[in-house]
């Protein structure tokens, strides 16, 4: 290969790799150790991790951080967890450390800014994206939620499912393949919540919190017929004060059709004098006191309004 062809190929490599390249790639392009050292000395190339350089005219970005880590660890390493989801463009913000899976046989030295995970990623669960070996989306999602607590994991999984980046069936299949790994218990719980369990769990918590707060007189799944709408089933209705609590699970289960139906239903309820309070699995698991306070304040406001109306009626007679 002619020198100018090698130089052109090397320029394409740098461009395709976000300005990052290995010293081995530079040597293959014809740069001697002395030439590499001279480039570094002139500030044209910036040393990153051992054996990896960045062209000075290319800014350091989250993508360059990932490129540097992966080039330094070689072809058998696999980007995983939230770093993989960032590379897949499923999430917009990368984690502080680049998460990389390496096989149990490898003993790479620690690298600043890199979190090494001892894990073999089977070939079917490994995909090359923009020149980087990345865990397949379902595997990356499960690895990511395994590093989070239940609520943070729920937020991530809910967002991923709502965007349609990964399907629930694919996540279930990946979970079966990875059973026994650290964090699979959390993943199992989150998959159950994603499969409709978040709503039933939210209902159970709402009922418990109201009972413990001494709020009574409510009915679950109460049916009413609304003018202009028809039959509606109310999640949690306080009939005397006409206060309704609507309980949602995750955003994943609220498509456009459900949103439009709920909007028409809520408008019909308001026209019939109902106060509608919406709560979610997230609020009920993270801040149940706020939920109870909202209900209590709505009840007090409805009772006060009823008293004023009654007094006005007596004065008018």
Image (cartoon, rainbow, N blue to C red):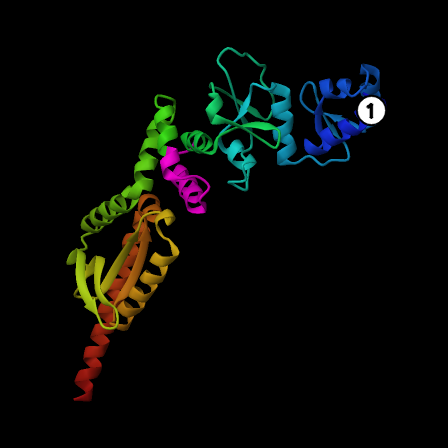
Q: Residue at x 69, y 33 (%)?
A: 16
In the rendering, at what x and y percent does residue 133 appear? 56, 26
Q: Residue at x 28, y 66 (%)?
A: 275
Q: Which residue is mark 1?
A: 39
Question: Mark 1: which secondary structure?
Answer: helix
Where are the magenta residues, as a range?
147-171
> Does 148 appear in magenta?
yes
Relative to 238, 60 lies left or right: right
- Of residue 216 and residue 162, the one placed in the foreground of this image is 162
Relative to 229, 84 lies left or right: right
Above or below, 279 against 86 in this view is below
Is residue 18 something that shows in the picture? no
Judged from this view, the residue extending furthest toward the front is 1
Is residue 89 something that shows in the picture? yes
Q: Residues within 10 Å of mark 1 (few under 14, many from 20)?
A: some
Quadrant of the rendered image containing residue 223? bottom left
In the rendering, at what x and y percent does residue 24 appear? 72, 17
- Of residue 5 and residue 310, the one placed in the foreground of this image is 5
């Amino acid at each position: 290969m002619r020198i100018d062809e090698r130089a052109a190929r090397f320029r394409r490599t740098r461009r395709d790799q976000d300005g990052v390249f290995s010293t081995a790639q530079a040597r293959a392009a014809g740069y001697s150790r002395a030439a590499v050292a001279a480039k570094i000395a002139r500030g044209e190339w910036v040393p990153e991790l051992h054996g990896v350089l960045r062209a000075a005219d290319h800014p350091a970005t989250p993508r360059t951080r990932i490129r540097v880590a992966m080039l330094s660890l070689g072809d058998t390493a696999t980007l995983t967890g939230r770093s993989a989801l960032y590379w897949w463009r499923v999430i917009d913000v990368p984690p502080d450390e680049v998460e990389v899976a390496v096989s149990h046989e490898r003993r790479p030295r620690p690298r600043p800014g890199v979190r090494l995970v001892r894990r073999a990623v089977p070939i079917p669960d490994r995909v090359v994206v923009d020149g980087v070996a990345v865990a397949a989306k379902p595997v990356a999602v499960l690895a990511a939620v395994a590093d989070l607590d239940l609520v943070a994991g729920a937020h991530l999984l809910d967002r991923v499912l709502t965007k349609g980046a990964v399907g629930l069936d694919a996540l279930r299949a990946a979970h079966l393949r990875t059973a026994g790994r650290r964090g699979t218990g959390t993943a199992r719980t989150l998959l159950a919540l994603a499969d409709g369990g978040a709503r039933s769990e939210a209902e159970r918590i709402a009922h418990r919190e109201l009972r413990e707060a001494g709020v009574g007189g409510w009915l679950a799944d109460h049916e009413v017929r609304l003018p202009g709408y028809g039959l509606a089933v109310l999640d949690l209705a306080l009939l005397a004060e006409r206060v309704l609590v609507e309980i949602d699970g995750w955003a994943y289960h609220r498509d456009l059709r459900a949103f439009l139906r709920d909007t028409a239903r809520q408008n019909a309820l308001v026209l019939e004098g109902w106060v509608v309070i919406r709560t979610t699995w997230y609020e009920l698991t993270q801040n149940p006191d706020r939920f109870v306070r909202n209900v209590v304040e709505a009840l007090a406001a409805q009772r006060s309004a009823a008293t004023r109306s009654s007094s006005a009626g007596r004065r008018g007679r």
